[in-house]
Amino acid sequence: MEKLLEIKNMSVSFEKDKKTTKIVRNINLSVNRGEILAIVGESGSGKSVTVKSLMSLLPEYAHVEADGVYFDGRDIMEMSPADKRKIYGKDISMIFQDPMTALNPLKKIGSHLIEVIKRHQKISTREAKILAVKMLQEVGIAAPEERMKQYPHEFSGGMRQRVLIAMALCSHPKLLIADEPTTALDVTIQAQILKLLKTLHKKEDMDIILITHDLGVVASVADRIAVMYGGRIMEQGTKEEILYDPKHPYTKALLKAIPKSDTARGTKLEAIAGSIPSFADLGEGCPFADRCEHASVRCKNANIGRNIFSETHSSSCVLKEIEKIEQGA
Ligand SMILES: Nc1ncnc2c1ncn2[C@@H]1O[C@H](COP(=O)(O)OP(=O)(O)OP(=O)(O)O)[C@@H](O)[C@H]1O
Ligand SMILES: [Mg+2]
């Protein structure tokens, strides 16, 4: 399978007050062409840090290490800041959780779009305006000419998110990173936005990384799922492998915490017993060890490995024998 993005062994740490805290550890992740990858995990698991590091959006005190981060065949880590800028906002676009903060309240919706369009194409304002109307239509906003003249506060939350999607699409990105794009919206609107993303994914030939802590979201749109916890990828696989044949105790616990297959969209993951560990206390061992019913001393101390179940399915559990334990062997 051809890969649009391949992250090889990436770690991210923050250096503050002469103290280094490792947040993201040894991430291996890829996005194949033609797919939607979901990154799922509880709050604070390192999802945003992971994708922000791809876009150089982390503060200066963040330190990113990797064996390589390949986008479209080129290693981003080796690129000059100028070359990176050519990719960000063009080949890779990102939309964030809160559409209000991403829009200037004093600027009309039309101006937002025209500005982004003109950044990417050398065309007149009048031509950009025609394109802007088309973009608003594309993301399902009715009466777009009228809407162009309005301000962000005159739009509903769902409509603002549509505008942000339209802005992200202006550069015809190869990869769209959507960091919890529906969290602030109510359930029906969430479903509409996800449907829109899925439609645009096909129509625009654009791959997507969708970050969410909502398993209902994942089930409806993702092709593959990576489960994150404590800055690590605990398990990854196709949607079917993760939802119907989970291997890692953490994934299993997550799935157990929600109602069965007819789970309504918008269902939040419920808390698993115990609390999320502090990153300062985490070592090379499994971050879930303290909350895991199968954990042994080995789990906290050993380097967590990688168990491969199929070409697409892998988990990082120290207890390679976990299946046997569960089967009572
Ligand atoms: N700029 C920063 N400086 C210092 N620590 C940070 C910074 N950004 C994130 N962190 C820390 O990194 C950890 C992971 O944060 P991150 O934002 O990636 O979580 P997340 O999985 O996206 O959570 P959520 O679902 O709540 O958005 C957290 O402990 C957070 O406090
Ligand atoms: Mg986040």
Image (cartoon, rainbow, N blue to C red):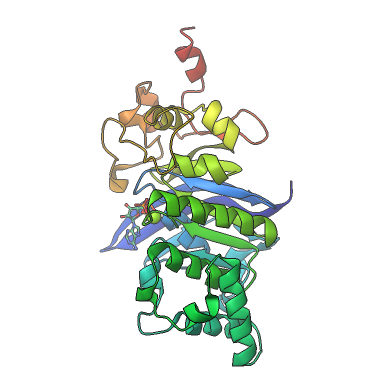
Residue at left offset 42%, top offset 57%: 49
Q: How many marks?
A: 0
Residue at left offset 53%, top offset 59%: 177
Q: Is residue 326 visible?
A: yes
Q: Is residue 34 left or right of residue 45?
A: right
The quarter of the picture where residue 117 lies is bottom right
Please name whichever residue, 37 or 282, is drawn nearer the observer in this view of the structure: 37
Q: Residue furthest top?
A: 329
Percent position of residue 167, x then y: 53, 73
Q: Is residue 214 left or right of residue 80?
A: left
Percent position of residue 202, x then y: 68, 55
For residue 217, above or below residue 329: below
Residue at left offset 30%, top offset 30%: 290
Please name whichever residue, 115 or 85, is drawn nearer the observer in this view of the structure: 115
Please name whichever residue, 297 or 157, is drawn nearer the observer in this view of the structure: 157
The quarter of the picture showing ligand 2: bottom left
Q: Is residue 48 left or right of residue 246?
A: left
The quarter of the picture where residue 75 lies is bottom right
Q: Is residue 205 visible?
A: no
Residue at left offset 63%, top offset 67%: 173
Percent position of residue 258, x then y: 39, 31
For residue 74, above or below residue 218: below
